[in-house]
Amino acid sequence: MSSNTFGKLFAVTTFGESHGPAIGCVIDGCPPGIAISPEDFTADLQRRATGRSRFTSQRHEADAVEILSGVFEGRSTGTPIALLIRNTDQRSKDYAAIGAQFRPGHADYTYQHKYGLRDPRGGGRSSARETTMRVAAAVIAKRYLAENFGVRVQAWVDQIGPYVAQRFDEAAIEQNPFFWPDAEQVPVLEAYMDGLRKSGDSVGARLSAQATGVPVGWGEPIYGKLDADIASALMSINAVKAVEIGDGVAVAQQRGSEHRDEMTRDGFSSNHAGGILGGISSGQTIVARMAIKPTSSVLVPGRSTDVHGNEIEIVTRGRHDPCVGLRAAPIMEAMIALVLMDHALRDRAQCGPAWHRRALDER
Ligand code: EPS
């Protein structure tokens, strides 16, 4: 596997497996002078972590970040930043029964056939655990974007199985275990998730995100489009099956006169485009959505095969997420922030600082 690095100028490499000794990342190209301490990672890592409610896997990891390099006296130095989190609560024996079996719908099958062997404990690289380091790296990106541009990225869950959010109250999102923007629906979701967990099954989810404060001009035409890079980044999250930008698939039924975002001296009068035109940010809020599949590690018996081709009945025991989408809001934010960070640096590298652009405008 040589595809574990992400970003051109703010390049993040993640490594590690769910049941290995540790997971980590190296961030190369980070601007110098950003204040970074191990505690800065805590809030977002806890938002993503398992074991924070009865609705997620009960694996309890401290997710304590060790900064191995690239930071001196609390500030980034411009050299590679290496972050490490030691795994402490693996329970590999849970996987003994299915080590030679394929979970239908899981990456087990394709990893095994591609490489001829795999680390079956906890899904290895295909585990949700891999997303920890994306969130850690994005803490630095989020800080840089906020301090230098006032950019803020917020994601939330707006569909769990048959339930769709009825209202959008941003203040509610962080106040419940579902990252759900409608407080009134939370008791219904709790009952639904309790029932689902008892049934031993899992369910999918849909999430939305918005990035506010992004200036006009980030992203490059054709092969470096901001929307293409966001889509790729979101699709790279394990279990994501669909991504939309702006109105997304709904554009198929719109007319041009409806879809266009009319402009006045005061700005755009709508945002069907989701803040990106021609692959370049328009200065409007960037809007993205993604759908996450129901995880394949379920207690409901299913037909499958083992590595020898024998037909078997599979049941996956252990600690699993009945809806991994419930933990995906910080991951979605992280991937969007990492793309924006990379494009902020790329924009400055090619087009120079704002004063340079103004000078060109005035010619
Ligand atoms: C996961 C199974 C569980 C989860 C894990 C994702 O753990 P294990 O890999 O030990 O079986 O707890 O998520 C995390 C550990 C995490 O930090 O996100 C799975 O089946 O994907």
Image: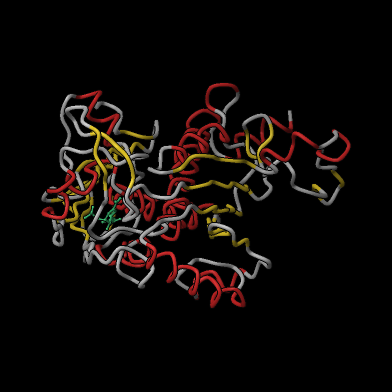
Q: Residue at 68%, 66% (x, y): give it.
A: 166
Rendering colour mode: secondary structure
Q: The N terminus lies in which quarter of the figure? A: top left
Location of residue 29 by image quarter: top left
* Residue 192 position in % (x across, y down): 50, 69
Location of residue 305 by image quarter: top left
> Is residue 270 shown left or right of residue 9?
right
- Number of marks drawn: 0
User: Which one is in front, 238 or 111?
Assistant: 111
> Is residue 137 shown left or right of residue 120?
right
> Is residue 183 shown left or right of residue 320?
right
One can see residue 161 in this view: yes
Looking at the image, is 170 positioned above or below residue 321?
below
Q: Residue at 13%, 61% (x, y): give it.
A: 88
Looking at the image, is 224 positioned above or below residue 78?
above
One can see residue 79 in this view: no
* Residue 311 position in % (x across, y down): 25, 34
Q: Quadrant of ligand 1?
A: bottom left
User: Which one is in front, 208 or 269?
Assistant: 208
Q: Residue at 22%, 67% (x, y): give it.
A: 60
Looking at the image, is 265 positioned above or below residue 102?
below
Q: Residue at 44%, 45% (x, y): give it.
A: 335
Q: The C terminus lies in which quarter of the figure? A: top right
* Residue 67 position in % (x across, y down): 19, 55
* Residue 346 position in % (x across, y down): 48, 33
